[in-house]
Amino acid sequence: MRSIDIHAHLTPQCFLQAMAAGQSWHGVNPGDMFVAPRNVWTPQQRIDDMNSLGVDVQVVSTGAAFYFYDRDAQVISEMHRECNEEVHQMTMDYPDRFKGFAQIPMQDVNAAIAELEYAVTQLGLVGAMINDTANGLPYDDPSLLPLWQAAEQMGAILFIHQQGGDTLVTPRSNRYHLPNTIGNLVDRAVTFASFVFGGVMDKCPDLKVCLAHAGGYTCFGVGRMDRGWQVRSEARVNIQQPPSAYLNRFYYDCLTHSEAALRMVIDTVGIDRVVFGTDWPADMAIDQPVSWVLGLESLTQDEKDAILWKNLEKLLNI
């Protein structure tokens, strides 16, 4: 049995080394960021844990704490370059175990395009992990269209993942871990809607977008989106089809924490659009993710194989 994990995070060793030496790192000072113990693991320690979980390949993404879209674009471009080169080195040192996502400075579209192109064409990374917004800009904002067009042309995958606890839910309630357990899912549904209602997916028909956490509330709420498209003219400004017609244009990781929810996602978007993701090494990750998928009684073996490795082998061309 093979497994490829599209949702696995990295705290860069270059950052950890600077913090241990008491040095500033691209404007980040010692003590500015909390680092959980597992986040300091070396690549070999990571591989040892992957082996214990039955994970063969991780598509590594530098953690969302390193987005820093609100800081100076030049400084963060240099930070992201260092992160991306470290991920690239992991893919060179362990080519059978790691693929990589880039970080790109979304506060500057031109800089983001340049870094994505460097990461994909020079470093061999498969795309980029980005937040649900660019400093509050939704992804149907016209200023971002050149980035989506560039990503489409490169064949780069955009993995959408929220920035920590900074979600749409956070201003209403920052208690009970709700920004994570609910906020992530709200943000992902809004991202889907922005790409679809904004006409981005029509303008970029070959754009590859993977929505973390199974697309959040997208599949559950798409019927209401369709109804809005049917009865409200403002919902039809940019698209000629209902939002549900676009569901199979996206990819969704399997991280639902619920068999019934995953079954609904599969039945809604199609099994060929659901991929394996663990959220390693976060505490919200599934403890034994491969075993969890294999133990789901409502999935056929063909569906389990598709999720665990077949769909990502095709998407990543490996």
Image (spheres, grey):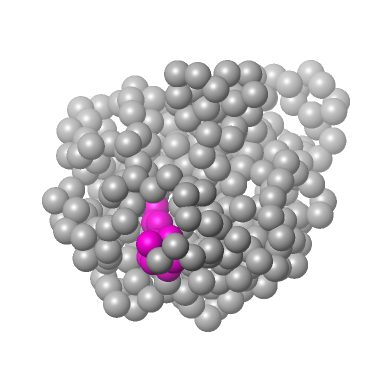
Q: Residue 18 colored magenta?
A: yes
| Residue at the extreme front of the image, as rendered | 22
Q: Residue at x 28, y 36 (%)?
A: 286
Reply above or below: 82 against 174.
Answer: below
Q: Residue at x 60, y 61 (%)?
A: 27
In the image, taking residue 196 as reference, residue 298 lies left or right, namely left
Using the image as rendered, state which of residue 192 and residue 48 is in the foreground.
48
> What is the magenta range?
9-20
In the image, taking residue 50 as reference, residue 244 lies left or right, namely right
- Residue 254, given in percent of the width and then of the height, sits at 37, 39
- Main structural element of the magenta stretch: helix, strand or loop? helix
- Residue 69, given in percent of the width and then of the height, sits at 66, 52
Can the viewer see residue 262 in this picture? no
| Residue at the extreme left of the image, as rendered | 52
- Residue 131, given in percent of the width and then of the height, sits at 59, 47
**Which quarter of the rendering shows the C terminus?**
bottom left
Q: Residue 98 colored magenta?
A: no
- Residue 98, given in percent of the width and then of the height, sits at 32, 66
Report how many numbered discs are placed on residues in the image. Answer: 0
Can the viewer see residue 107 in this picture? yes
Reply above or below: 126 against 293.
Answer: below
Q: Residue at x 53, y 57 (%)?
A: 29
Using the image as rendered, state which of residue 221 and residue 95 is in the foreground.
95
| Residue at the extreme bottom of the image, as rendered | 122
Reply above or below: 80 against 234.
Answer: below
